[in-house]
Image (cartoon, helix red, strand yellow):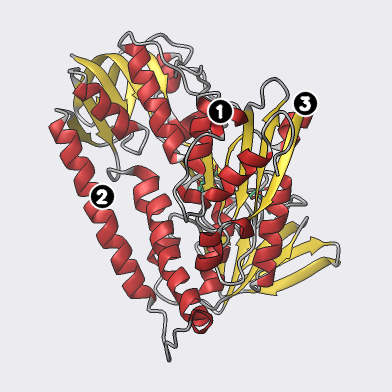
């Protein structure tokens, strides 16, 4: 009899299992494919490994501006894949060691709930007081003729490519589509992005998204939006947009990046009485499903499809199931899109504040105020937008479009989570010279009681 059975070993499941193990609980973790889940094997980590190499490629092209002459260079995709595989293998091993140290029993196989406290894995029947479902999500296949064909790749298969495509069509301008647009554009492919909405990166601040689109366009990425993809036939994407009702883009590679859907099928959720739909398993901010003792975290909930959100949700669920009240602070959750330039944010967007009729102040600071930013980014541009509340200058949102913003957005999350006002935050010392100083400057300019010179 276990205290907890976790189904799915992604960043939601393995972190939760290890946390419960470290609390002295008897824990089983069941995984049908690979430890690490999508994030480690076909998501965050492979994508950032690819983007590191493509950035180097771009930097070689731009090196002369920094006084460095590189000579001829080439991009070796099989070597990039090999490097990525090495990083993934090292991280997977690290997780295995962590789970072992935490005393977690790992089972390989497809788990299925047979009752509210029972899980079947192959021939083994496991029982536990608590079950945490952390089965993640998989690429969505929208009802577009031909998009499900094997010729169309998705983020599950993109990281094993061995040949640099000449022309790439990307369907969907969300996080995955835009990160791949940066990657392929930086390694020299022609890239066209097809998006049904009239904007890119629909979850993030509108001004930030528009600037990102401009920057990507300047680096050669073509955008068709809003557009309707009529079908994909071999390498040809047929689409309709303002320029015409039936156009064609011939590509060497078509990538489907139209979202991810929760993995809820085949888990026996019906047998255990767990509410779910194609959109995922609904949970409270404590991680509870409608069935006492059954919890869920991460992408399977269909809410905040981010690895770090999954990890926090899993830990919160474990704390609550073992008697320590805890909840997820979604209002402070950071998010990053690893494009060039990067986009990072925490807290609410202007659109959300307007929709909720919340009075707010806005301070926009160009990245050029940071000496370090100018040093690191030749001809780089970007801005940081700080949104503050009317009560005491509380920080409601921070939105940045600029490289390196991924590395300091956590400071914005901390300010929001600790409910610091701008006057108090202005006393924090930021290291100099760092790109993060743009946040300090925005806080300084937003101080309540009159703008300071
Ligand atoms: P997404 O939901 O961010 O974007 C999908 C885009 O495809 C949307 O803009 C949508 O309007 C568009 N779309 C859907 N159907 C379409 C159609 N038939 N024709 C044209 N456009 C269509 O999903 P994405 O980028 O696939 O990412 C999946 C999840 O993974 C997201 O929830 C995201 O948060 C997460 N993720 C996070 C990353 C990060 O934190 N850096 C990186 C990659 C993914």
Q: Is residue 96 left or right of residue 176?
A: left
Q: Is mark 1 within 8 Å of ligand 1?
A: no
Residue toward you, 135 or 151: 135
Marks 3/1: CA–CA distance: 20 Å
- In front: label 3 or label 1: 1
Question: Which residue was labeled with disc 1?
Answer: 424
Give the image location of residue 209, x and y in percent: 68, 52
- Mark 3 highlights which residue? 359
Residue underneath mark 2: 91
Q: State how far apart marks 1 and 2 are (Cα).
A: 39 Å
Q: Residue at x 55, y 23 (%)?
A: 419
Q: Secondary structure at mark 2?
A: helix
What residue do we see at 74% from left, 52% from top? 199
Q: Upstream in the sequence, badge 1 or badge 2?
A: 2
Q: Quadrant of the N terminus?
A: top left
- Tell which tag, 2 or 3, sits nearer the viewer: 3
Q: First in sequence: mark 3 or mark 1? A: 3
Q: Is residue 374 visible?
A: yes
* Quarter of the view holding residue 252: bottom right
Is residue 149 in view?
no
């Amino acid at each position: 009899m276990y205290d907890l059975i976790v189904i799915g070993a992604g960043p939601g499941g393995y972190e939760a299992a290890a946390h419960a193990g470290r609390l002295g609980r008897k824990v089983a973790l069941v995984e049908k494919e690979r430890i690490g889940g999508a994030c480690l094997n076909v998501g965050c980590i492979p994508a950032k490994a690819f983007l590191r190499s493509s950035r180097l490629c771009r930097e070689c092209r731009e090196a002369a501006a920094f006084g460095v002459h590189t000579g001829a260079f080439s991009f070796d995709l099989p070597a990039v894949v090999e490097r990525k595989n090495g990083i993934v293998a090292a991280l997977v091993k690290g997780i295995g060691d962590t789970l072992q140290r935490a005393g977690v029993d790992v089972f390989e196989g497809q788990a299925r709930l047979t009752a509210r406290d029972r899980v079947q894995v192959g021939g083994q029947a496991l029982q536990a007081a608590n079950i945490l479902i952390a089965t993640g999500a998989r690429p969505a296949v929208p009802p577009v003729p031909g998009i499900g064909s094997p010729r169309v790749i998705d983020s599950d298969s993109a990281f094993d490519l061995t040949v640099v495509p000449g022309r790439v069509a990307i369907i969907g301008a969300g996080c995955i589509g835009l990160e791949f647009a940066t990657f392929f554009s930086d390694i020299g492919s022609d890239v066209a992005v097809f998006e049904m909405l009239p904007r890119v990166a629909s979850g993030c601040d509108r001004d930030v998204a528009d600037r990102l689109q401009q920057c990507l366009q300047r680096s050669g990425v073509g955008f068709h939006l809003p557009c309707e993809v009529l079908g994909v036939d071999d390498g040809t994407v047929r689409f309709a947009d303002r320029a015409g009702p039936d156009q064609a883009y011939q590509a060497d590679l078509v990538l489907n990046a139209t979202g991810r859907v929760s993995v809820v099928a085949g888990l026996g959720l019906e047998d255990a009485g767990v509410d779910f739909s194609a959109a995922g398993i609904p949970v409270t901010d404590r991680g509870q499903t409608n069935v006492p003792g059954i919890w869920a975290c991460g992408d399977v909930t269909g809410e905040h499809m981010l690895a770090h959100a999954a990890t926090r949700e899993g830990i919160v669920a474990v704390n609550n199931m073992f008697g320590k009240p805890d909840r997820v602070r979604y209002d402070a959750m950071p998010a990053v899109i690893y494009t060039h330039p990067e986009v990072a944010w925490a807290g609410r967007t202007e659109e959300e504040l307007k929709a909720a009729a919340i009075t707010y102040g806005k301070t926009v600071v160009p990245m050029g105020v940071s000496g370090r930013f100018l040093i690191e980014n030749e001809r780089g541009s970007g801005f940081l937008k700080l949104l503050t509340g009317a009560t005491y200058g509380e920080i409601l949102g921070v939105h940045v479009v600029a490289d390196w913003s991924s590395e300091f957005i956590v400071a914005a999350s901390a300010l929001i989570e600790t409910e610091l006002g701008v006057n108090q935050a202005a006393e924090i010392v930021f290291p100099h010279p760092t790109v993060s100083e743009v946040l300090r400057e925005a806080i300084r300019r937003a101080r309540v009681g009159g703008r300071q010179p």
